[in-house]
Image (tube, grey):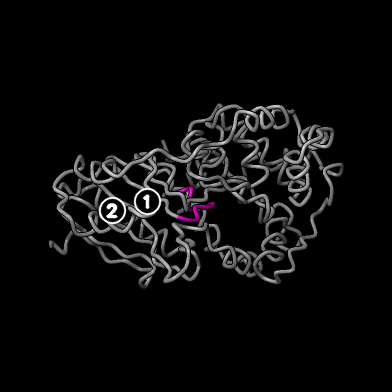
């Protein structure tokens, strides 16, 4: 193999790169953390994709997650939220670098000039959705669980979520964004968040073929996947779609909760209970983001999300940030009892929500100003 096809990497083994024929393989190798993305991993994936885009020998790229012996698979469970918490309290500038570089990577994958295959086995959440949704072929199994659970940590669905959730039919995007509900392969394919279903029993042979089988062309890479494609399990019944649209088409978070409270069914009660656990302020920010996302290009959405994530940590300061508090409750103290301010949707401050959507940068100074 030509060593020039693999550039030097900085993540100290958290990303593995390999080349098989015309295929470049990127393996997220942080299995003990469900392959959650560190800044070094974001940099390595970006380096590999940029390098391979310029290499005529590489005709296609595959992204996959390292497995865990004896445990269910995880493609990528998101970003390294403990790092976010530490960096916010320390005033560490690398927190800003993380989001700028992660969003650039998301955009790169969506615009990539060669076919990209995302092997989305197991857990695919947050940042894992960000690096897979732009792939030309998104491959799922019955073990796949897709979610954008950011409102649970006082954040919003970023990494392009404001754009790709907005593309879902009806008001599915609002439902997924506000609740963080995890969906299986059938729903993901039905709603445009996945492309192909391959049964779990077929994955070892699929991965082996991609890693070591003959891969002379991009068409052959795609055929390697498609020859194992099967019908996905049945997706959500029409009744669920009707409920989603009825409740999550309401104009405000307060109206959504009121609509759910008035419904007499278990689905509405469970959904209502879920929303009561989320940050009221960040649910309002999230709802506005998804609704704006329907009218934005991906690049404009990522610029908006970069504004929002800056404000998530800095608008109130780290000591009062909903995001810092949400991460504390989930991943640091692990008491699962975030102290949201305000605690209920009745206290949502419309002026504060509006302030999230005011960019802290002039257009020519925006860190993502050059995305097209």
Question: For this view, does 264 lie left or right of residue 63?
Answer: right
Evaluate if marks 1 and 2 touch, with contact meaning CB atoms under 8 Å apart.
Answer: yes
Residue denoted by label 1: 119
As for residue 127 lying within the magenta part, the answer is: yes
Choose top left, top right, bottom left or bottom right for residue 205: bottom left
Report the front residue among 298 and 260: 260
Q: Residue at x 71, y 43 (%)?
A: 283
Q: Secondary structure at mark 2?
A: helix
Q: Secondary structure at mark 1?
A: strand
As for residue 215 lying within the magenta part, the answer is: no
Report the front residue among 69 and 365: 69
Q: Residue at x 71, y 52 (%)?
A: 315
x then y, percent, for residue 281 = 75, 46
x then y, percent, for residue 347 = 86, 44
**Where are the magenta residues, as a range?**
122-130
x then y, percent, for residue 88 = 63, 64
**Residue 206's disc number:** 2
Choose top left, top right, bottom left or bottom right for residue 83: bottom right
Viewer-nearest of discs 1 and 2: 2
When the figure is inspected, residue 193 is found, relative to residue 200, above or below; the finding is above
**Residue 331's disc number:** none
Report the front residue among 155 and 139: 139
Question: For this view, does 252 lie left or right of residue 166?
Answer: right
Q: Residue at x 50, y 55 (%)?
A: 123
Q: Residue at x 48, y 71 (%)?
A: 32
x then y, percent, for residue 216 = 13, 47
Q: Earlier in the sequence, mark 1 or mark 2?
A: 1
């Amino acid at each position: 193999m030509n060593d020039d096809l693999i550039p030097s990497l900085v993540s100290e083994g958290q990303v593995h790169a390999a080349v098989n024929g015309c295929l470049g393989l990127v393996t997220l190798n942080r299995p003990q953390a469900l392959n959650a993305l560190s800044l070094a991993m974001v940099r390595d994936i970006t380096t590999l994709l940029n390098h391979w885009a310029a290499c005529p020998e590489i005709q296609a790229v595959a992204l996959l997650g390292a497995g865990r012996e004896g445990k269910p698979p995880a493609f990528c469970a998101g970003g390294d939220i403990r790092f976010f918490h530490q960096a916010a309290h320390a005033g560490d500038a690398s927190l800003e670098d993380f989001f700028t570089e992660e969003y650039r990577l998301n955009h790169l994958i969506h615009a990539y000039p060669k076919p990209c295959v995302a092997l989305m086995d197991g857990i695919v959440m947050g940042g894992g959705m960000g690096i897979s949704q732009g792939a030309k072929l998104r491959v799922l199994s019955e073990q796949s669980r897709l979610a954008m659970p950011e409102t649970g940590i006082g954040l919003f669905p970023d990494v392009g979520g404001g754009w790709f959730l907005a593309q879902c039919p009806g008001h599915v995007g609002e439902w997924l964004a506000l609740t963080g509900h995890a969906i299986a392969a059938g729903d993901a394919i039905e709603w445009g968040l996945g492309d192909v279903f391959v049964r779990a029993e077929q994955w070892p042979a699929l991965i082996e073929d991609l890693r070591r089988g003959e891969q002379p062309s991009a068409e052959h890479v795609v055929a390697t996947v498609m020859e194992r494609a099967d019908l996905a399990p049945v997706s959500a019944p029409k009744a669920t779609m009707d409920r989603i649209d009825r409740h999550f088409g309401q104009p405000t978070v307060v109206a959504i909760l009121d609509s759910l409270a008035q419904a007499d069914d278990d689905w509405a009660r469970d959904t209502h209970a879920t929303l009561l656990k989320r940050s009221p302020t960040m649910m309002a920010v999230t709802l506005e983001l998804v609704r704006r996302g329907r009218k934005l290009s991906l690049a404009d959405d990522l610029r908006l999300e970069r504004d929002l994530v800056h404000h998530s940590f800095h608008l109130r300061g780290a000591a009062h940030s909903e995001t810092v508090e949400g991460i504390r409750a989930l991943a640091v103290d692990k008491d699962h009892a975030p102290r949201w301010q305000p605690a209920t949707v009745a206290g949502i401050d419309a002026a504060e929500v509006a302030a999230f959507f005011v960019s802290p940068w002039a257009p020519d100074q925006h860190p993502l100003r050059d995305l097209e």
